[in-house]
Image (spheres, rainbow, N blue to C red):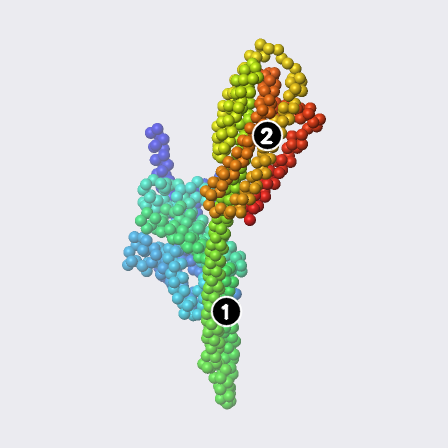
C-alpha cells in the first residue's frame, strides 16, 4: 500500500514537472489510441506577434475578436437593404454599438468579480463578459438607431446572426488564453495545460476538480453552438413573421446553450451562490419565449402588421441612399467641369448656377423632405391602425357582453320554463293522486268482498264438522263481520285479513290428511258432476257484484263532477258516501244469495279434502271448477259472464278512462 502511494506521488510530481517545462503546451491525453500530435501536445502562445521597434504585442484573443466583428459587419451590411435598413444610417449605430459593447463587457466583469474599478481600462489583461458586451451594444446602438429614424427591432434582426458570427470566432481566443474551461472529463477532446492545472489547484480546493486530469473545453462547445445558431437564423430570416423575431430566436437559442455550458465551467462569475451567466441565460429564454408568443398571437388576431421594409419611411430612406450616391457622383463631375473651364479661362457662371440649383443645399434638402413626408404618412397609418384595433376590440367586447346577456336571458327563460314544468308536473301528480285515491276507494268494496269470501271458505274448511247441518249455521256468523268490514273505506285492512289465511290453510291441509287416513277416497269426477249447478251460481254471483259496482260508480263520479269540489277533503267525504251506498246494496244482494254460496262452499270443501296434502291447487280454483261444471250441466253451455271475463275488464277500463277525461276537462 505504501509503495502504491509512493508511486502515485512520483507520477504526480513527474506530471507537474512536465507541465512546468512546457508552460504553453496544451495536451489532449484521451485523444486516439496511439501517440499523436494532440497527445504529445501543441505549443500555443497567447501573443500573436509584436510590432517591430516597439514592445506593443498583438494577442490572439483581440485579433480573433476583431476578425469576428469584421466578418459580422460584412454579413450585416449585405442584409441591411433587404430588411429596409439604410446602410449609411446603420453604420452610425454599428460604430456606437461597438464601443458600447466594449464598455459593457468590461463593466459587467468588474461588477461580478473582484477586479477594482480603477483597472477598468486594463483591457489587455483580460476580463470581458459576453453578456455585458451584448447589453452595452444594444443600449448604445439602440439609442443611435432611434436618432437616425430606424426601427430598432428590424436592426436587431440584422445584428442577431452577426452576434453569432462574432461569438463563434471570438471564443477561440479563450483557447489561446487557456480559459473558459470546465470540470474533469474522459472524453477524447478533454484538454490539459500548465495554466489550467495551476488555476484549478489554486481556486478549487474542495477536490471536486482534479488539476492533473483533462477538463471540458467549454469554449469549444459554445463556439460550435453559436455556429449552428448562425446557420439556423440565416435560413429562418426569410420566414420571419415580424421585425425582432430573429433576435428573439437568438436570445432563446444562445441562452439555452449557455445555461447548460455555464454549468460545466469552473471560472464562472457568481452572485452569492448563483452563477450570474446561468441565471441571465434562463431569464433570456423565458422572457423571449413569452414575448414571441404574445406578439405572434396579436399578429394573428389583427392581421395588420407591416414590416419596416414595407413602410413609406424605409422606402424613402432607401431611395435617398440610392440617389445620394448618384447625386454625389454627378456633383463631382460638374465640379470637375467647372474647374477645367476655369483653367481654360472660359465663363463658368452658368455651370455654377446649375451646380447650385441641382446639387446645392436646397437640392439636398428637397431629397430629405421626401423622408419627412414619408415619416408623417407612416405616423398617420400607424394611428389609423391603432384606431382600427381599438374599434375591433370594442366590437369584440360588445359582442361578448351581448352573448353574456343573451346567455343570461336564455338561462332565465330555461329556469322559468323548468319552474312552470315543475309546477305543472306537481299539479298533474296531485290530480293523479286524487284520482287514484278515488278509484281505490271505489274498488275497495268489491275487492274486500272478494277477499272476504276466500277466508270464509278457508275457515269453513278448517273447522268443518262431520255433518253438514252445523256447517250452514257457522258460515252466516262469519259473513256478518265480513260484511261489516266491507263498509270500511281504507283498503289497507284487506292486507291484514290475508295474514291468517296461510295459517288456516295449513290447518285445513293437516285435517284433510287425517281424514284421508280414516275414510276412503271418492272419485273426483262424481263430486264435480254433483256440484256443477252450485258452482255456476257461485261464479255468477261474484261476477255480478263488480259489474253492479262499476255501473253505480260512474254515476257517483258524475255526481261529484257536477258539484265540482275544490278541496281534497270534500272529495274524500263524497267518495266514502258513495262506497257506503254501494256496500249497502252489495250486502242486501249477498244476503239473498247466502244459501247458494254456502252450498258452493260445502262442495268446494269436499273437493279439497280429496286432494293430496302437497297439492298446489287453491280453494278459489276449486270453486271456479265447480261453478263452471254446474253451469254446463244446467244450461248445456257456459255462462256468458263466466266465459267472457274480458268484456267486464274492458268495461271497467273504459269507465275509468271516461272518468279521468272528465276530471281533466
- Residue positioned 51% across, 24% down in the render: 478
Q: In this view, does 632 lie to the left or right of 87?
A: right
For label 1, the residue is 311
For disc 2, the marked residue is: 542
Q: Is mark 1 on a helix, strand or loop?
A: loop
x%, y% of residue 580? 51, 36
Question: In terms of sequence position, does the residue under pointer 2 or pointer 1 come before the other?
Answer: 1
Above-or-below relation of 159 to 509? below
Packing grade of label 2 (10 A; few <14, some 14-19, many >=20) is some
Residue at 56% across / 29% down in the picture? 590
| C-alpha gap between disc 2 and disc 1 | 106 Å
Visible in this render: residue 229? Answer: no
As displayed, is residue 196 above or below residue 169?
Answer: above
- Identified at 37% across, 46% down, the residue is 266
In the rendering, at what x and y percent does residue 556 appear?
Answer: 54, 41
446 or 112, nearer to the observer: 446
Amino acid at each position: 500500500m505504501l509503495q502504491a502511494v509512493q508511486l502515485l506521488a512520483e507520477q504526480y510530481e513527474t506530471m507537474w514537472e512536465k507541465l512546468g517545462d512546457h508552460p504553453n503546451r496544451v495536451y489532449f491525453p484521451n485523444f486516439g489510441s496511439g501517440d499523436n500530435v494532440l497527445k504529445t501536445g501543441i505549443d500555443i502562445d497567447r501573443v500573436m506577434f509584436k510590432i517591430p521597434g516597439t514592445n506593443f504585442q498583438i494577442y490572439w484573443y483581440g485579433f480573433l475578436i476583431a476578425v469576428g466583428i469584421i466578418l459580422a459587419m460584412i454579413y450585416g451590411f449585405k442584409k441591411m437593404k433587404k430588411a429596409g435598413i439604410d446602410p449609411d444610417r446603420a453604420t452610425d449605430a454599428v460604430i456606437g454599438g461597438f464601443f458600447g459593447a466594449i464598455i459593457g463587457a468590461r463593466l459587467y466583469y468588474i461588477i461580478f468579480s473582484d477586479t477594482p474599478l480603477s483597472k477598468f481600462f486594463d483591457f489587455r489583461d483580460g476580463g470581458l463578459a459576453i453578456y455585458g458586451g451584448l447589453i452595452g451594444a444594444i443600449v448604445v446602438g439602440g439609442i443611435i438607431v432611434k436618432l437616425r429614424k430606424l426601427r430598432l427591432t428590424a436592426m436587431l434582426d440584422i445584428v442577431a446572426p452577426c452576434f453569432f458570427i462574432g461569438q463563434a470566432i471570438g471564443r477561440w481566443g479563450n483557447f489561446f488564453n487557456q480559459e473558459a474551461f470546465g470540470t474533469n472529463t474522459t472524453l477524447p477532446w478533454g484538454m490539459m495545460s500548465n495554466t489550467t492545472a495551476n488555476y484549478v489547484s489554486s481556486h478549487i480546493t474542495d477536490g471536486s476538480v482534479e488539476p492533473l486530469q483533462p477538463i471540458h473545453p467549454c469554449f469549444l462547445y459554445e463556439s460550435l453552438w453559436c455556429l449552428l445558431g448562425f446557420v439556423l437564423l440565416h435560413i429562418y430570416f426569410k420566414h420571419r413573421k415580424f421585425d425582432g423575431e430573429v433576435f428573439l430566436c437568438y436570445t432563446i437559442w444562445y441562452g439555452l446553450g449557455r445555461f447548460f455550458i455555464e454549468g460545466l465551467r469552473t471560472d464562472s462569475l457568481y452572485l452569492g451562490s448563483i452563477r450570474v451567466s446561468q441565471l441571465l441565460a434562463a431569464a433570456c429564454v423565458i422572457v423571449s419565449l413569452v414575448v414571441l408568443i404574445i406578439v405572434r398571437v396579436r399578429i394573428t388576431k389583427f392581421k395588420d402588421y407591416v414590416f419596416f421594409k414595407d413602410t413609406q419611411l424605409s422606402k424613402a430612406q432607401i431611395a435617398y441612399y440610392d440617389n445620394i450616391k448618384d447625386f454625389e457622383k454627378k456633383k463631382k463631375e460638374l465640379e470637375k467641369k467647372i474647374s477645367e473651364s476655369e483653367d481654360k479661362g472660359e465663363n463658368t457662371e452658368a455651370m455654377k448656377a446649375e451646380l447650385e440649383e441641382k446639387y446645392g443645399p436646397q437640392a439636398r434638402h428637397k431629397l430629405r423632405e421626401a423622408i419627412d413626408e414619408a415619416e408623417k404618412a407612416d405616423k398617420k397609418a400607424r394611428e389609423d391602425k391603432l384606431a382600427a384595433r381599438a374599434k375591433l376590440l370594442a366590437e369584440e367586447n360588445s359582442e361578448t357582453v351581448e352573448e353574456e346577456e343573451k346567455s343570461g336571458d336564455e338561462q332565465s327563460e330555461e329556469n322559468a320554463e323548468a319552474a312552470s314544468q315543475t309546477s305543472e308536473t306537481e299539479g298533474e301528480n296531485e290530480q293523479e293522486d286524487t284520482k287514484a285515491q278515488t278509484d281505490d276507494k271505489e274498488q275497495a268494496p268489491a275487492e274486500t268482498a272478494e277477499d272476504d269470501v276466500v277466508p270464509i271458505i278457508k275457515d269453513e274448511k278448517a273447522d268443518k264438522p262431520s255433518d253438514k247441518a252445523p256447517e250452514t249455521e257457522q258460515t252466516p256468523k262469519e259473513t256478518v263481520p265480513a260484511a261489516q268490514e266491507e263498509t270500511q273505506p281504507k283498503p289497507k285492512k284487506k292486507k291484514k285479513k290475508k295474514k291468517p289465511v296461510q295459517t288456516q290453510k295449513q290447518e285445513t291441509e293437516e285435517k284433510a290428511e287425517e281424514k284421508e287416513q280414516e275414510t276412503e277416497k271418492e272419485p273426483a269426477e262424481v263430486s264435480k258432476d254433483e256440484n256443477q249447478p252450485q258452482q255456476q251460481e257461485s261464479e255468477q254471483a261474484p261476477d255480478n257484484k263488480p259489474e253492479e259496482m262499476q255501473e253505480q260508480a260512474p254515476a257517483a263520479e258524475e255526481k261529484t263532477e257536477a258539484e265540482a269540489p275544490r278541496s281534497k277533503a270534500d272529495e274524500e267525504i263524497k267518495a266514502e258516501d258513495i262506497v257506503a251506498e254501494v256496500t249497502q246494496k252489495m250486502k242486501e244482494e249477498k244476503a239473498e244469495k247466502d244459501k247458494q254460496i254456502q252450498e258452493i262452499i260445502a262442495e268446494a270443501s269436499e273437493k279439497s279434502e280429496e286432494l293430496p296434502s302437497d297439492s298446489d291447487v287453491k280453494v278459489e280454483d276449486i270453486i271456479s271448477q265447480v261453478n263452471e261444471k254446474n253451469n254446463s250441466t244446467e244450461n248445456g253451455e257456459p255462462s256468458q259472464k263466466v266465459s267472457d271475463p274480458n268484456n267486464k275488464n274492458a268495461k271497467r277500463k273504459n269507465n275509468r278512462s271516461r272518468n279521468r277525461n272528465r276530471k281533466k276537462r
